[in-house]
Image: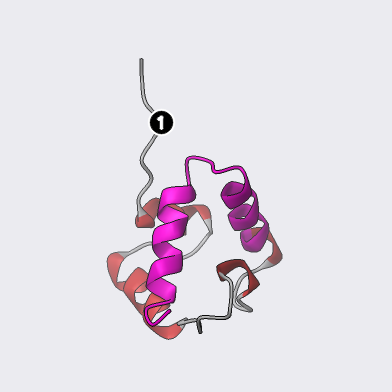
Amino acid sequence: MLGEPNYTMTELFMQLGLDSSDEAIDQFIETHQLDKDTKLTDADFWTDKQRMFLEEEWKMDAVWVEVIDELNVRLHPTA
């Protein structure tokens, strides 16, 4: 029996329609830091489609949730 896929940050950025090179991911994270009171899905840099994807996957605790959580942590380094 096959397990659920284990998505990477590269695949998440591809899914979000963002540049998914390692350098672009690092640059995005560096330039889009969030304060501790801003939820990932409330950030003003997402398009409506990106926000909807993140919210739906998070609520469903879907296969993307681990990498979304990783992105959340990386965007909130001081939280």
- Point out the image quarter for the C terminus: bottom left
Image vertical order of residue 15 relative to residue 70, above or below: above
- Magenta stretch in the rendered image: 50-79
Q: How is the image coloured?
A: secondary structure
Is residue 19 something that shows in the picture? no
- Disc 1 marks which residue? 4
Residue ID at (32%, 74%) = 26
Residue ID at (40%, 51%) = 11
Verify whether residue 49 appears in magenta: no
Is residue 9 something that shows in the picture? yes
- Majority secondary structure in the magenta region: helix
- Other residues around mark 1 within 10 Å, as few (<14) / some (14–19) / many (≥20): few
The quarter holding residue 71 reads bottom left
Q: Name the one closer to the observer, 29 or 72.
A: 72
Could you say where residue 64 lies in the image, as x and y percent from the top left?
48, 46
Verify whether residue 68 appears in magenta: yes
Residue ID at (57%, 81%) = 37
Could you say where residue 75 lies in the image, as x and y percent from the top left?
43, 74
Residue ID at (64%, 72%) = 42
Image vertical order of residue 73 relative to residue 37, above or below: above
Q: Please indicate whether residue 27 sits to the left or right of residue 16 in the image.
A: left
Q: Name the one closer to the observer, 20 or 42.
A: 42
Q: Dot 1: what SS?
A: loop
The quarter holding residue 76 reads bottom left
Kind of residue at disc 1: Glu
Q: Please indicate whether residue 60 sits to the left or right of residue 22 in the image.
A: right
Could you say where residue 35 lies in the image, as x and y percent from the top left?
51, 84
- Point out the image quarter for the N terminus: top left
